[in-house]
Amino acid sequence: MRVVFILGVAFLGPAVACLVVLRPFVVIRFGALNAGRIGELAIRPEIFLCKRDKRSFREKQVDVIGCAYPISNTYLKTMFGTLLPITPGAWLWRLFDKSCQFWTRTNIHHADLLSQFSDYHLILESAPHLTFAPKEVSMGQDLLYRLGIPAGSKWICLHNRDSKYLDVKLSGQWSYHDYRDFSITTMIPAAQTFTEGGYFAIRMGSVQRELLDQINPMIIDYASSPYRTEFGDIFLSAGCSAYFGSDSGIVTLPFIFRRPVSFVNYSLTLLKQVICLTSNLVLPSITKHLFDANSQRPIGLRNMFAVGLNGGAHANDFAEAGISVVSNTPHEIRELADEVMHRLAGTWIPEPEDEVLQARFWRLFCELDATTDSSVLRARIGAAFLRQNQHLLD
């Protein structure tokens, strides 16, 4: 393959020369988008568009984006395709991109669709780039009717992470993600809490291991519904009052439509990512518990840093450090749901110690992670969770 690549770069030399000649009139850039995971397909084009909006161009610019298969949501790709020329043949445009970089020794012709968590602040600085046409709004209203959701209702999107999607849809070994998994049954009390507050609770997802087994008509297992569609995934995420659940890629759908999100079972080791995500769109979250595998004692922030787990994102990281990962209990998740619901309504009343504990938690984190700027930090841990897990501050 390397030989083929080198030959391709050499063959495209004359084409690159033509692109250079055209620069005074139009700059053509090439990029590629991996679309097998909804997180990449949603967030990368949106942030790319946010960055493009902020740039001032003296010359006309055209971006050509190749989309790699498989595609996790073809409807979302089509929506972005109205704003970006997303085409098949990712391999060809990658070759053009590398050829331009080789022959010109610059990135002028490179359309960079990679994004970092530190780029997520751009989401707040513009309106959503994707909108629904009147026909699509009618389609969405019909979906709500079929799901038993009356017009004008509010809903919360729920999601639990399991490994079935990756196992079924994408080849490869994905067990290193398994520490992130948790059962949908642990979210049922939270779903009940949301319905008591007047919200429908809609369980999202496309391929899930478990059914959401309950009889409350306001709790809907959309992930297992015959009415689930790729369009529905987008419409429900765009119109929810909030997303509540795992950090799986599907969270990026409400996020790109500027809907608030609240994480459960987030990894304590990835707090830096929560901080980068934090904005008016991020509600309080709670993390999984870390325990010393030998003593079964809970691990706080200091010990997490001491064993080198800050930033740990693979199951092997925990195993090598002698740390076990335990999911949030149904009670912890329900308490967070109660706080989220009251914060959405503007009726949340903290207990006297809550702000003190928040300040202590984040001050300690900033002491341990010198790269975090405490002056702009706006992340929050669930109030009840932090009250009950003050070992995190040890």
Image (cartoon, grey):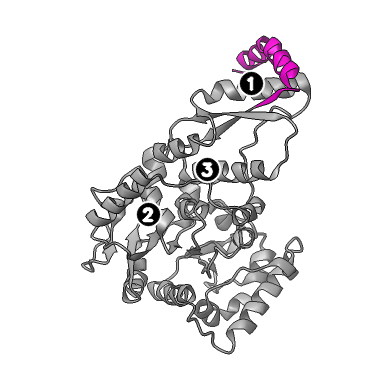
The residue mark sitting in front, 3 or 2, is: 2
- Between disc 2 and disc 1, whose residue precedes? 1
Q: CA distance from mark 3 to mark 2?
A: 19 Å
Label 1 sits on what residue type?
Phe
Quarter of the image where the C terminus is located = bottom right
Describe residue 222's horizontal placement relative to residue 36 as left or right.
left
Kindly give the residue lying farthest to the bottom in the view shown: 352
Label 2 sits on what residue type?
Leu
Picture coordinates of residue 28 (x, y %)? 66, 25
Q: Nearer the viewer, residue 91 or 152?
A: 152
Picture coordinates of residue 7 (x, y %)? 65, 11
Circle 1 residue: 96
Label 3 sits on what residue type?
Glu
> Can residue 206 be seen in the rendering of this structure?
no
Which numbered marker is on residue 301?
Answer: none
Describe residue 386's horizontal placement relative to residue 307 as left or right.
left
Tags 3 and 2 touching, CB below 8 Å: no
Circle 3 residue: 40
Q: Residue at 76% x, 22% y: name it.
A: 24
Circle 2 residue: 236
Q: Nearer the viewer, residue 165 or 310?
A: 165
Q: Where 353 sits versus 213, above or below?
A: below
- Between disc 3 and disc 2, whose residue precedes? 3
Instruction: Write down the region rendered in magenta.
Output: 1-28
Q: CA distance from mark 1 to mark 3?
A: 22 Å
